[in-house]
Structure formats: C-alpha cells, structure tokens
Amino acid sequence: MAVPTINERTRAKADPLRNFKYQVQFIHQDNGISTEINKMGFTSVEGLSMSTDVSAYREGGWNTNPHKLPGQTDFAPITMSSGVFYTKPGMWNLAKQMFAVQWGAGTLGMGSEFRFDILIRVLDHPVTKGPESGVQGNPSGAVLGFKAYNAWAANVAFGGLNAGDNGVLIHNMTIHHEGLEVLFGPDKV
C-alpha cells in the first residue's frame, strides 16, 4: 500500500497559484494571423473581469426597500502589453484588420473576419506543481484558463521614445470581447 505524501495532499491548500506563468493563444479563422500572434509573449494581461448592472424597483405595498434584479452583464476590456515586439508584427496586423473593416473589408488585402477568441492558460509553477499538472493528460501544465469570445482589437499603443530614458519600448493593445469563461482544472484547459 502506497503511503500518500503530505505535499501532494495539502499542496492546493498551502501553495497559492502563481500569477506570473501564463500563456496567451489567439484563435482566428486566418491561421496566418493566429500563427504570427501566437509567437508573441506578453509581459502583462489585465482586465479579466465582468460586472452586472442592478435594476432596482419599488413595489406599491412593499416600499421600505427596493427589490433588485440582475441587469445587463458587461465584460471589461483586456489590455495586453508586450515588451520586445519589433520583430513580431502580429498585433499590428491584427489592428490593421480593424482598419480593413472600417474602410470596407478587403482594402488592406486582408480577410473580412476581424473577430477572434483568446485563450489564456495559467501554468503551474515547475517547482511546486502537483501530480495533476504537466503529467498524464496535461502536457501544457495549465491548471486554470480564461477564454474570451468574439474579441477584436480596439486600441494599439506604442511606448514613447525618450533619449534620456533607459526603458524598454512597450506595446499595448486593448481588446474588447463579448464574453468571458473561466476554465477550471487541467482537463478543461
């Protein structure tokens, strides 16, 4: 009979999920754009949230406090920052896809589909990873995921140029989407 080790049994309670190991995948109809963008690494991903409005109403005979119903749900825009991007034009080509839609599809020689899905995988830390990650059935090591649907690039920004600064040229992209799903467990990601 194998004796279970304490680390495997209590690891989920003792070690928090680290937020600095993640992988971003763009899923687009045009495989050329997807392949180009998926080669990029991001220094930060922010805006993984949703909020639901409240619709309050008062009832005639019961007006000491209002009743509250859930209203429309909205999803915050996702902002991605990339450090070294000068040899990887994927995000700029994705932004040009929006220009093509606004100017009439096809004017930039690109396809008419500007929407894509985003899958963000949170990876387990290699030192504290448990038996469920990176072993059988889960070679990626992902333990949690976020999937955004029907996303499109709304804003592209480049860091400023300053001769007196020693910073890295950062590239930011704001992406709007129509839905967010959280994928729990390595078999879902």
Image (cartoon, grey):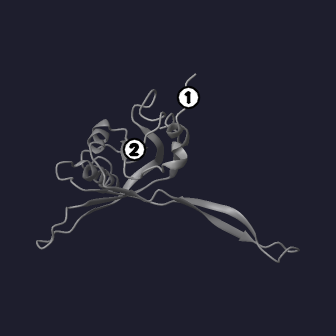
Q: Which residue is mark 1?
A: 3
Which residue shows up at 37% across the image and 38% down it?
29
Viewer-closest of 141 and 109 = 141
Which numbered disc covers residue 61? none
Screen quadrant of the N terminus: top right
Q: Which residue is mark 2?
A: 125
Which residue shows up at 53% across the image and 38% down it?
6
Viewer-closest of 19 and 94 = 19
- From the viewer's perspective, tell me whether residue 81 is left or right of residue 65: left
**For mark 1, does the 10 Å Cα neighbourhood hold few (<14), some (14 to 19), or many (20 or more) residues?**
few
**For mark 2, does the 10 Å Cα neighbourhood hold few (<14), some (14 to 19), or many (20 or more) residues?**
many
Give the secondary structure at mark 2.
loop
Which residue shows up at 78% across the image and 73% down it?
58
Which residue shows up at 71% across the image and 70% down it?
56
Q: Quadrant of residue 31?
A: top left
Cα–Cα span, label 2 and label 1: 24 Å
Viewer-closest of 169 and 143 = 143
- From the viewer's perspective, tell me whether residue 79 is left or right of residue 64: left
Q: Position of residue 139 (x, y in %)?
A: 40, 31
Mark 2 and mark 1 lie on one chain; the one further toward the N terminus is 1
In the image, residue 126 sits, relative to residue 1, either above or below, namely below
Viewer-closest of 49 and 113 = 49
